Amino acid sequence: MRISWLEKTFAVFTLFLFTKPFIDTGLVEDGWISKQGDYLVWGVFLSVYAGAFLLLGKRQFLEWASKDKLLLLLLSFVLLSLAWSEDPAITFKRTIALLGTVTVGIYFASRYSLKELVTLLAWSLGIAAVLSAIAGVAMPHYAVMTDEHYGAWRGIYVHKNILGRLMALSSISFLSIATGFRSHRLVGWVGFLFSVALLLASTSLTAVLVLSVLVFMAPLVNLMRRHPMLVPALVASSLVFASMVVWLTDSSPVLLKFLGRDPTFTGRVDLWQSAELVIEQNPWIGHGYGTAWVGEGDDAATDISRFSEWNAPNAHNGFLNLTLDLGLLGLVSFLLGYVVAVRRSVAYIRNNLTAADIWPCMFLVFVLLTNLTESVLLSYNNIDWLLYVATVVSLAHNSVGYSRPLASQIVYG
């Protein structure tokens, strides 16, 4: 089955859109998109949901959506949370967006192989990198932060940490291309170095640490093919070690002082403690998807603002944020699905021989590490969750030996 250039262009545009460029930035506030433009943004996302569903078809969508049962279990908690949500209207609206994001993720899993997904991702994030660099040079008053993060680049995004996280993701996608595709080796290395340069310009310490861990892991994961018995131990120890490095660097006063960082990690420690207090109010089922940070009265948002001096948009920890929304039952549901996906990614590495085949394992480690200090788990209209859905569904498909139609080799000019 050959995929047209028009559909490939749609795929690259979709991945770029889900990085949410220009949205909620100074570029937006000063006229690129006015406040009324929220309707335009939602219209574009709804159009992409519909386009992905139409390209997929109802029958194929249902077939692929049922491949990962644990993902369906997690999504069922989201839907059920409408019954106990503190703000059902907010939960309903955000659930629609989440299901749209999942639909797009399933579209990518069904239409493209994991190798092709990496290529598409590299092109979309490469566009984001080029536009961020142009914005930083041509419009530094917008693309370079001037507040407490003075001089840090945010590019076409609202914050430096978002640019840093996306450039870490861009770096590992281009690294996969450089080491796994001989015909694209030069493009891969140029993209990798360019992405690393922008990551450093963002001054995002977490992104630097995450990328360092992933680059260190890449050759080790490739070596595991020769010694398959070491696979489980090495993957588990790498995850634990990487998590400890990021966590200790982010929370240890001694290390933070050495690195010139705030011992409270820019208020995150207080925020996490506040979130834990709110979780205790409804620990098993949470406050309803998307509502832990909205509403009035004695609800989660009021309590968090009461205990924390930082009026943050989320818990800045994906696992805490998910527990706030869906409780411990939701968190356990996600963790079970994640562990199964890691096991499948290890099997995928052992059964596939090219360097690009380590992408699923690398991406799953990326998800774990970034969510220690950011909240992108179960996040609607977000490229991290779109890619997570696409990756776990593809791994589920490969694990049961379904025959995938021959997708066209993606080569861009």
Image: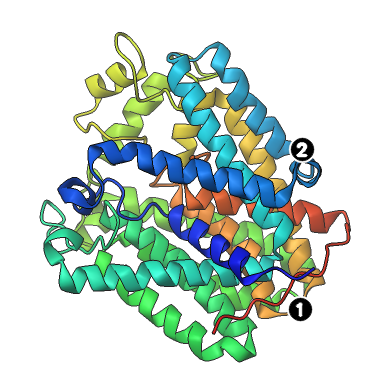
Q: Is residue 343 visible?
A: no
Instruction: Give the answer, above or below, for where 88 lies relative to 257.
Output: above
Describe the element under mark 2 as helix, strand or loop: helix
Q: Amino acid at mark 2?
A: Lys
Tag 1 or tag 2, which sits nearer the N-term?
2
The residue positioned 51% from the left and 22% from the top of the image is 92
Residue 220 image position (x, y, % from top left): 62, 75
Residue 348 image position (x, y, % from top left): 76, 65
Describe the element under mark 1 as helix, strand or loop: loop
Residues at discs 2 and 1 in contact (Cβ within 8 Å): no
Residue 314 image position (x, y, % from top left): 35, 35
Which residue in the structure is indicated by mark 2?
69
2 or 221: nearer the eye? 2
Instruction: Give the answer, above or below, for where 209 lies relative to 110.
Output: below
Which residue in the structure is indicated by mark 1?
353
The alpha-carbon separation of the residues under discs 2 and 1 comes to 28 Å
Name the quarter where the C terminus is drawn.
Answer: bottom right
Q: Quadrant of residue 1?
A: bottom right
- Tell how many labels: 2
327 or 169: nearer the eye? 169
| Render colour scheme | rainbow
For this orientation, the residue located farthest to the top is 297
Badge number at residue 142: none
The residue positioned 16% from the left and 59% from the top of the image is 142
81 or 119: nearer the eye? 119
Residue 11 image position (x, y, % from top left): 57, 61
Instruction: Give the answer, above or below, for where 335 lies relative to 243.
Output: above
The residue positioned 11% from the left and 52% from the top of the image is 147
Specify few, some or many for label 2: CA neighbours under 10 Å numbering under 14, 14-19, or 20 or more: few
Q: Amino acid at mark 1?
A: Leu
